[in-house]
Image (cartoon, grey):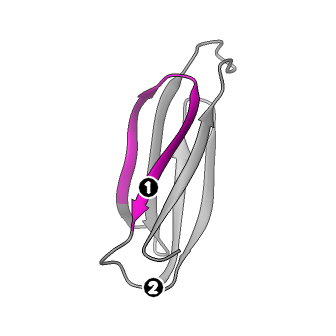
Amino acid sequence: FNPSTKIKYTIPSVTLSEVEGSLVSLKIYDVLGNEIATLVNEDKPAGSYEVEFDATGLPSGVYFYRIQTDNFTSTKKLLLLK
């Protein structure tokens, strides 16, 4: 991506705890594991969401985003090319 991208995610209406919605944390990390940005850190009701990550001012390279909820964690790779 260059210089911004959109990250889409969905919170299901029924989770393992049978509670609608969840505390969502979405953070960006560099290849060394340093936290670059926190895009989301709040309770979200069930539904689909989209958040924009603007990497203006960051050097080209590999970055990771981690999304965490009460019952789920996923890490994906981002490649910034300028």
Left or right: 63 as drawn, with respect to 12? left
Looking at the image, how many numbered discs can be counted on the residues?
Answer: 2
Whether residues under marks 1 and 2 lie with C-beta atoms below 8 angstroms apart, the answer is no
Of the 4 image quadrants, the one containing the C terminus is bottom left
Q: Which amino acid does label 1 sit on?
A: Glu
Residue at which label 1 appears: 52
Which labelled disc corresponds to residue 64? none
Of the pair 43 and 17, the residue shown nearer to us: 43
Q: Is residue 48 magenta?
A: yes
Relative to 68, residue 38 above or below: below
Would you call the spot at circle 1 few (<14 residues within 10 Å), some (14-19), or many (20 or more)?
A: few
Which residues fall within the magenta stretch?
Answer: 37-54
Of the pair 44 and 2, the residue shown nearer to us: 2
Q: Does the magenta stretch include residue 71?
A: no
Residue at which label 2 appears: 60
Image quarter of residue 33: bottom left
Q: Position of residue 76 (x, y in %)?
A: 62, 60
